[in-house]
Image: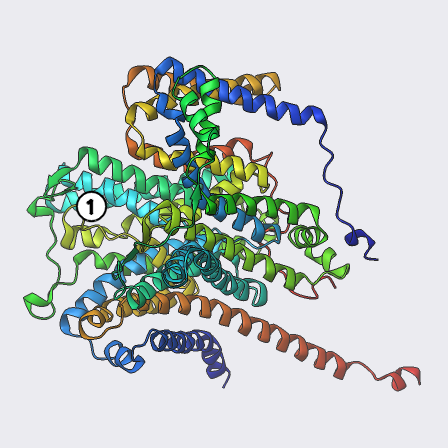
Amino acid sequence: MSTLLAEPAAAPARSARSRYTWLWIALLAVAAVSAVRVITGAHQIDSPGSLRAALIATCPILMAAMGGLWAERAGVVNIGLEGQMILGTWGAAYFTYFYGPWVGIIGAALLGAIGGALHALATVTFGVDHIVSGVAINIIGLGASKFLAEAYFADLDGGGVKQLTGLDRPPSFTVPGISDAATGLSEKNWFFVSDIASMVAAVTTGLSAFTVLVFALVGVTAWALWRTTFGLRLRSCGENPQAAESLGVNVIRYKWIAVLISGGFAGIGGGFLALVASSGFVTGQTGGRGYIGLAAMIFGNWRPGGILTGSLMFGYTDSLPLRSSETIHALLLLVAIGLVALSAWRFYKGQRTQAIVFAVLGALFLLWFLTTDEVPREFTGMTPYIATLLVLAFAAQRLRMPKADGQIYRKGSAG
Amino acid sequence: MNIVKRVLGALIAPLVAVVAAMAITSVLILFAGSSPADFWSIILDLPADRVYVNIINQSSMIFLSALAAAIGFRMNLFNIGVEGQYVMASYVAAVVAGLALLPGYANVILSLVVAMAVGSIWAGIAGLLKVTRGVSEVISTIMLNAIAITLTGYFLNTYGDKAGNSRRTTVLEEGSQLDGFTPFLDRDGAIWTLAILAVLAGLGFSFLLNRTSFGFDLRATGMSETAAVASGVKVNRMVVISMMLSGAIAGLIWMPALFGAAHSYGTTFQAGLGFTGIAVALLGRNRPLGIFFGAILFAYLNEQSNRLTIETDISQNVVQITQGVIVLAVVVAYEVVGRRRAAAEQHAVKRQLDAAKPTKEEAVS
């Protein structure tokens, strides 16, 4: 009876060819970035400093998105990510102040998981609509973080009613030799070589241990959800809970676990904001990143690889306001090139209408690039949202969310 | 007897929720080392005259916001984008009002129309994306919220008039400012004239949903989309129209404050009402009367809590938690009560069937 669920499903066999295709696309993308850099002379677009800032901005979004993935793969929509993330910022600050950064990270996960527990209690146990519960949790999370900050941080060193600064950070390290060599090479501004060197320099210089932890958790998520029996059962709860229950899976328990992990991940994302991305805790410092995480998850088609790509992209745009305006302007050319490439691909696939739409958009971006000298900084902040809307509008058929996502499940409804 | 039972049945869930929220809030305050007694004595104290006026003004805006969300909810459309719609509409309406294209009160009317139009267009984008491209309105409205807030921020910073360190839209000329109604002394403030919009919108909402065929179709779609389609309702059209209606009401949310007190869009803009409205709509079961009480409760908590910071060591933000818990508790309570009732009905039907059915022995003989 349970043989079907006893063994993990074989991962979809990916041929060597498709793996190379992705490698080619990645290399072409780097070449395009490099070309834009050389043409415009905006070397900041992928300097080691820019990439490091982008990496730091990526982590909170990535953790929120991974949190969303855990919940939605088990069939629970979690728009309370923002609230859980906010709780995480407070948890990280409180526990770091008293017990050091590592306990702080655990504290962030704990506070996020409390938000997750609230969501699980409402949606899984009581069968409340997932969106309704998520909205309430966002309200509670924001209120609770303000209340707790005022109650606990006001009298601490470096604290105030709305903040707590001067926290210990998780250790960061630089790989000797490689870091200097790569940084030196990236400063030569050669085509392609310097861009690769930039990437190497970004991950070998002053890399926070917390960043490593975040990427490790992404790997663990991908492995646990797709390569273990536990993951298969959890995902079966998001696809067809009735069938899962009929095969002996305790659906309610799996959903609870998934939502707790989801909240914990979002909390860790919040902790990263407080401990690495900024100089301490400030109320409301998430600034909608929970929602961007949700967007990255959808953009990534509910899969770890896609989510990683989406989060890197959104993280990069999130770090852009720190860069010079020429840099942001140069990116218009990159977007234009990307859209034209997409248009060509769609034309090749025989989708004429979409090819034309993308070609026109590409031309508009090119025109924008050629006729202006700078882009308002505010516009970069909208990029994740507009990108997600466009992906949803043009690639909705290619997106596939878990089949029973957002549906209320009641024990015994398998009949 | 039956009526008493029904009234009790309708009230039990909100009552349980409020009691639960009171208990949780008290525990939290205790946990933070303060006295819950201080908290409740201030919250339950009689409001000052000035606070009465503020409660009425605030609840009118919360009511409009909740009504906007409720229209969507009644047909299972989750318009999370009320926030973005009213930010966008408030800004554009304030710009138009500042231009003073028409004299006096005509300018007010024009601005209200503009606000409703902008709100409904911004919501309509989500509606169109849903029916043409199958994009979930929850996601698209979340994205549109962020875009609206960024866009208005950009326009305000680029084209707004300088006022000290910040920027604002052109201040209304005096003929278009509405003085409102002063029930107490002048220093206690005035009830904004356009608070009346809340009453009008509430009546309109009731009439539209309960007395027109459009309202019937809307409610039918919300209860069972397949049944509605089968009876000839054009669901796609309904989706776009109700999103736009929702956006039109959302556009009005901040108008009482704009013409009554703020007179320009700038630092005086009150953000966040969109999310409060969603919570109040859920609290009031998407019915105008329920929303009315919910809006007053939320406004009351907000205004009364202002005294906390001055008179005690309790943060006034604690009422945000109270409000969130009320919403969560009320939906849980409705769910539990609903399940209980369904189970009771099933039992009743079973008893009747068992009584009517001949027993085995009788059937055999």
> Would residue A321 be seen by someone viewing this image from the given angle?
yes
Amino acid type of the residue tagged 1 in the rendering: Ile
**Can you give x and y, in whole percent of width and height, for residue B322 in the image?**
36, 69
**Can you give x and y, in whole percent of width and height, for residue B204 in the image?**
34, 56
Task: Place residue A6 in its image quadrant.
Answer: bottom right
Say above or below: B297 vs B253: below
Residue drawn at the location 57% of the way across and 22% of the way down: A25
* Along the viewing direction, whichever of B84 and A211 lies nearer the viewer: A211
Say above or below: A121 vs A325: below
Residue at the top extreme of this rendering:
A39
* Along the viewing direction, whichever of A295 and A33 lies nearer the viewer: A33
Residue at the front extreme of this rendering:
A177
Q: Which residue is mark 1?
A: B109
How is the protein colored in the picture?
Answer: rainbow
Residue drawn at the location 59% of the way across and 75% of the way down: B340
Q: Quadrant of the N terminus of chain A?
A: bottom right
* Along the viewing direction, whichever of A163 and A78 lies nearer the viewer: A163
> Would residue A357 be seen by someone viewing this image from the given angle?
no
Say above or below: A104 vs B333: above
- In the drawing, does residue A252 fall left or right of residue A392? right
* Along the viewing direction, whichever of B250 and B360 lies nearer the viewer: B250
**Can you give x and y, in whole percent of width and height, for residue A22 in the image?**
61, 26
**Can you give x and y, in whole percent of width and height, for residue A62 in the image?**
49, 43
* Secondary structure at numbered mark 1: helix
- In the drawing, does residue B352 fall left or right of residue B341? right
Say above or below: B275 vs A189: below
* Chain hosting mark 1: B
